[in-house]
Amino acid sequence: MLATLVTAVVEGLQGALVRVEVDVAPGLPVCQIVGLPDAALSEARERVRGAIRNSGFAYPAQRITVNLAPAGRRKHGAAYDVAIAVGILVASGQVAASGGDWALLGELSLSGEVHPVPGVLPMVHTLARAGARRVGVPAANVAEAALVEGIEVEPLRGLDDAARLVAGPRGRRAARASRAAPVAVSGVIAAGATGSAPLVEAGPPVDLADVRGQAAARWGLEIAMAGGHSLLLVGPPGAGKTLLAGTIPGLLPALDDREALEVTVIASVAGLLGPGDGLRRGRPFRAPHHTASYAALVGGGPRLAPGEVSLAHAGVLFLDELAEFDRDVLEALRQPLEEGSVVVARAQGTLRFPAQVQLVAAMNPCRCGYFGDPDRACTCAPGDPERYVRRVSGPLLDRLDLRIEMPRVRPSELLLGPDPESSAAVAARIAEARARSLARNGGRLNARLGGRETVELGRLGDPARELLAAVAIRRSLTARGVHRILRVARTIADLAGRDPVDTGDVLAAADLRDPAAAARPGLAA
Amino acid sequence: MLGVGLFGPLGPAPGGTRHRAAEVGDVRARAAGDPQTGGPRDGRASFSPPGPAGAPAAEARSGRPAGIHPASGHPELAEERQAWIVLATVDGVGERTLAGLVAAHGSARHALWLAARGRLGRALGGVADGRRGIIPAATIAGIERAAREPGARLSALAARGVWTLTLLDPDYPRRLLTLLSPPPVLFGQGDARAMETPRSVAVVGTRRPSPGGRWEAARTAAGLAARGVTVVSGLAVGIDGAAHAAALDAGGMTIAAIGSGHARPGPAAHRGLAERIRASGAVIGELPPDAHASRGTYPRRNRLIVALADAVVVVEAPARSGALITAHLALEQGVPLCVARGQEGAERSAGCRALLDEASAWPFTDVTSLCDSMGWRAVAADGSQEGGRPGRADPGLSPEESTAPGPPTATPDGHEITPLPPLGAAERMIARRLAGGPATMDELLAVTGAAPGELAAALTLLQLRGLARTLGPLYLPAGSLLLAVP
Ligand SMILES: Nc1ncnc2c1ncn2[C@@H]1O[C@H](COP(=O)(O)OP(=O)(O)OP(=O)(O)O)[C@@H](O)[C@H]1O
Ligand SMILES: [Mg+2]
């Protein structure tokens, strides 16, 4: 007997429809799966066989042929397990397909449980667009599947649930089906098994009220977050760079609907959506460790998973200890940062993951960390601090807009200074400034303006324009340098609700240093 | 010295403490063509020093005063002079070997003549104190090579734009003659007259200064330059570099005494600085151009720094710093030693505190009191006497600099662009604070009570006017702010 079911796989951030055809016929008891690469094939066969047996069904002692169509499509993951198993049950007559057309998604364990799979959101979306009306998804993925409108979603905890769905209320055999004792799987292992493991999972954001002193750095951070400008924090150990960066998630406004969907899809494909996780509204803040590999940062790898730079899409990618990152890995970030997306090459063409990130990085000024410290001696050899900064890829430094130097806080400031402003107050100003710039720039933050647009949309007063020219000549600025100051000045004015940009805004922006100049700090001479 | 009071002993010490170079002086007298003691006996025709076309040209370029061409009209002296220089270009031939050779063979020319024939003995001549010595074989080989191609040696110097001054020359720097063992041949680039300026002060210190030390050095050098005092230092990174640069920025004269050859003067990071010093001051040393610095060369170089200075200022020196060698040489040579105490307990000034506590060094406070102690009346850089104290109470903020718009700047294509806005009250307040020393933005925010944006704008303006610069999180005073009395 022949059974046909519908399932899906993930390609990049898209779901792709897969038809499962199962034929069970008399013959030698072998199971042949067509349309899967060899390695995945034998694994799928074993999972399906175990799951059928442990769910109270019989694994047919006949010739089983499974065809996953279209054959040419690469089928990553194991979301097709449930559909294959149910197909075998139907084709062998153990379950009657009387419950209507169900699309099925889910990976099976040998015990017959249905495990969550990455990418349920885009897969369900594709199924719905292809006309599917009903879909069974792993119970842990129901929340994301429910985000798709126009399709009925049922949770699957085990193969028995899937059999009952397909058989409908009249399927008596399926109703009796049971599962073997569930195998306890901790959430962490489950996530690790299905998605790229989060390298550093952000805790709750630090509140700015807990960061004492550092008034200049707080000011720079506020500007960076208001304008989406990328930021380099430089300072000695213990200055509070990591602490300050930890406040970022609490300073950024929530994602809008379009961004939220993109971010949730990426998280879904990466297997980072937890059970019950629906639409993501918080801006991503990803802080990969400096030992992160190329694939982990940029994406790709055998699973074609999105990398950290895509997981941070619409949010912040924080590279702590920037000088410790592998130079080649950082160089690879350059193109995604420039284009706002990552292109992953594969056999059948290329995939594109979005990667519109705001880069924030932190580093020490030198190996020992105390170069330029007012009090403590730097123990690096002369010339070493410059070499240390030059280790960081120059093109990457070129992509950074602002550099903030953080001195060590003095004990007096730590203990006696005035109580700092809280994140809520700063976030409110940031939200206002962002709203102003988004409205003026056609939905883009100031940092995203191109050179000409910066001048056109910047609304620069004549005195400010002339002053900027004077600054540019005296500092021999390149076009990049002029636009950098202009964009930052625009943000400073947005924070103050000022229009047009005035001379004070330009001068203040010009004091925020150029990270690219850090590679050759004006030292001795 | 400590008991004498601020005004007495800081002037150049009258005799006694500084020594005339007795033995080398003798060499000089002998070599100067006295036929009895040192004149060439034979071989003059064989060592026929080339009329190096390049050498005089190099000297003309060097900006040496007219009349410095030594021994013009004394062909023998001219040849002997060149023989000295050729010998001095040989690796391993220092002041002792050269003096010994002249003593042993009557003249450098004769020594070279012998060497060209492979007949130069290894024994050095007895000198005044009866010291004798043996020349290492490697050095003999080097001398023989040089003797076979003396012209090439001289033109190589010329090609590098290196001039030489020998003890035979009437205009050998007077200050160096006070050394116990002055370099018989001095190699230099730039203006040799820098060594003859009437007032000069050495500013030395650690290669790893704190920002505060860097500022102190710059402030001191700028103040000296503004008073027409030449700033002497060693071209090292750190305090030396800050002192040279500030003196140049203030339009002053500065001399770098280097412990390596002129091909690699100082660290690579200071190539540009060395170029600037050559353009308006002098870079000098006693090693031939290709010589590398080694362990011993820096301490020897330090004695040149001390000899070229009327006073030595040590800004920041940890225990066991090279600057301490310079300081002790100053004490030995009777050159007034002024030491900045630095922050109490700061490791980077431990050597300074030891000098102040254990040696007879003067605490250094500022350039004005230093100059007062030296008995120097204020002299403007152009040499004219200036009335009153040179340190303005509010420099950089004088009416013409602060309220008048800055000089108009023209774009490369000739368009006049906006002058900088004038300094307002906020900028003046910040400038006054900066004149007191480096500060972070946070400290300036606390002092001024300004909003960060306003403060940042003011700091940009000060930087554009050359009154401030940045180092890490610090803003440092620069330009005329260095001269401000906080
Ligand atoms: N400005 C500050 N206010 C309050 N606490 C601070 C501040 N700066 C540092 N700290 C404390 O010091 C700890 C270390 O700071 P943090 O890890 O942010 O330093 P860092 O600059 O990232 O240093 P490193 O270069 O070593 O990574 C923080 O966890 C915090 O407890
Ligand atoms: Mg850190």
Image: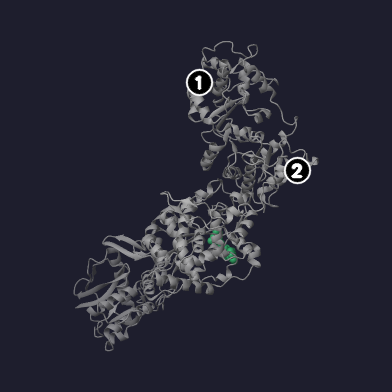
Q: Quadrant of the C terminus of chain B?
A: bottom right
How many discs appear? 2
Q: Nearer the viewer, residue B327 or A245?
A: B327
Q: Earlier in the sequence, mark 1 or mark 2?
A: 1
**Disc 2 marks which residue?**
B358
Kind of residue indicated by mark 2: Glu
| Furthest residue toward bottom | A170
Q: Chain of mark 2?
A: B
Secondary structure category for the residue under label 1: helix
Q: Quadrant of the N terminus of chain B?
A: top right
Do marks 1 and 2 share a subunit? yes
Q: Is residue A409 left or right of residue A141?
A: right
10 Å crowding of disc 1: few (<14), some (14-19), many (20+): many
Residue B165: x %, y % from top left: 58, 26
**Residue at the (62%, 60%) spot, across then down:** B429
Secondary structure category for the residue under label 2: helix
User: Which quarter of the picture shows residue A357?
Assistant: bottom left
Q: Can the viewer see residue B226?
A: yes
User: Which quarter of the picture shows residue B100?
Assistant: top right
**Disc 1 marks which residue?**
B150
Q: Chain of mark 1?
A: B
Residue A105: x %, y % from top left: 31, 76
Kind of residue indicated by mark 1: Pro
The answer to whether mark 2 is within 8 Å of ligand 1 is: no
Q: Can the viewer see residue A272?
A: no
